[in-house]
Amino acid sequence: MVLSRWKDAGGLTEFYSVADAQFLIGWGWIPLYKETGDERFLSGSQLLLDATERLLGEFDIIPMDYIETEGKWKNYTINEAGFGPEGIAALYEVTKDERTCEIGELYMSRLLPKFQRADGLWERKYNFDTKTASPTRHHTRGQG
């Protein structure tokens, strides 16, 4: 998994996120692979796809954050998980591997029932414990 961000809450905490890492693949690694031909970008993308598939076997929807210092996943996913298919789609564009497409479809098929509203927007946060979604705020960040 790719380190996604740091949070300073009385000490630095490492956050790992499938959605953020897949976004990195879509906007960084696959374009770099196309430009340079460096196989490390492609093989790293494939490894993350494998991790995504494995986590889809463990969770209904993949939690948003794995917290290194806690050694566990958080009990929620936010609408920004919808960024994940950026990487999956970019990898599929290069490989044309149907397995990649199937993983992308599975990923989205699990998010949509939890987040999508009748007006086409997505709710903000899905809590695994309560099995409920928090209403969206009026911003577009997670609506991409």
Image (spheres, rainbow, N blue to C red):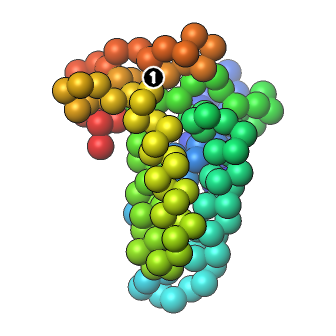
Vertical order, 97 against 120 (above or below): below
Amino acid type of the residue tagged 1 in the rendering: Lys
Seen at 55% across and 57% down, the residue is 103
- Badge 1 element: strand
Q: At which x and y percent is residue 69?
A: 77, 31
| Whether residue 25 is visible | no
Q: Which residue is mark 1?
A: 125
Residue 53, horizontal then vertical, whole percent: 65, 54
**Which residue occupies the foreground of this view, 86 or 99?**
99
Residue at 50% across / 79% down in the picture? 95
Residue 42 figure quarter: bottom right
Q: In this orientation, which residue lies closer to the viewer: 119 or 72?
A: 119
Q: Nearer the viewer, residue 138 or 3?
A: 138
Give residue 137's quadrant in the image: top left
Q: Position of residue 105 (x, y in %)?
A: 46, 53
Residue at coordinates 29% horizontally, 43% vertically from top-left? Answer: 144
Residue most toward the left?
119
Q: Is residue 92 left or right of residue 143?
A: right
In the image, residue 17 above or below residue 33: above
**In the rendering, at what x and y percent does residue 72 appear?**
76, 31
Who's the residue at 23% across and 25% down the image? 118
Furthest residue in direction top, as rendered:
130
Residue 39 at least partly seen? yes
Q: From this viewpoint, which residue is outermost toward the bottom?
A: 37
CA neighbours of label 1 inside 10 A, class few (<14), some (14 to 19), many (20+)? many
Looking at the rendering, which quadrant does residue 119 occupy? top left
